[in-house]
Image (cartoon, rainbow, N blue to C red):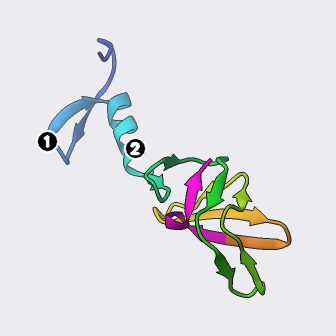
Amino acid sequence: MAGEDEDYVYDEDTGEWLPASELAAKRAAEGTVEVRDAVGNLLADGDQVTLIKDLEVKGAGRTLKQGTLIKSIRLTGDAQEIDCRFERIKGLVLRAEFVRKR
């Protein structure tokens, strides 16, 4: 529960007066995007993922095989894309529907 001396701020979305810390937490949560893998696991920065199908990498002339381990992913802010690195492929962006959390 909010402390007695905490400032209250009017939330225009709900039409209620909320403690400033609660409103700040609510606004921060609105800006986050949940990224889920092919089976519904929640992904986070730094996770390791495995490819669930062969993927041809355009511009690199390579194919990443099913079962390939991708280490240390980064979320991009898009619910369907993750940024990662793989040997000699810079700027690799994968769709979350093709990976499974390890």
Q: Nearer the viewer, residue 13 or 4?
A: 13
Most distant residue in the right direction? 88
Q: Which mark is residue 15?
A: 1
Q: Position of residue 59 (x, y in %)?
A: 74, 88
Alpha carbon separation for disc pair 1 and 2: 19 Å
Drawn side of residue 16 relative to residue 87, left or right? left
In magenta stretch: residue 97: yes
Tag 1–tag 2 contact (CB < 8 Å) = no
* Magenta segment: 93-102
Drawn side of residue 26 relative to residue 93, left or right? left
Q: Nearer the viewer, residue 40 or 79?
A: 40
Q: Is residue 97 above or below residue 26?
A: below
Q: Say which residue appears at 37% left-offset and 44% top-offset.
A: 27
Q: Secondary structure at mark 1?
A: loop
Looking at numbered disc 2 in the image, what kind of residue is underneath it? Ala
Q: Looking at the image, is mark 1 or mark 2 earlier in the sequence? A: 1
Q: Secondary structure at mark 2?
A: helix
- Main SS of the magenta segment? strand
In magenta stretch: residue 89: no
Q: Say which residue appears at 19% left-offset and 48% top-offset.
A: 13
Q: Say which residue appears at 56% left-offset and 55% top-offset.
A: 100
Q: Is residue 11 above or below residue 93?
A: above
Q: Position of residue 54 (x, y in %)?
A: 64, 74
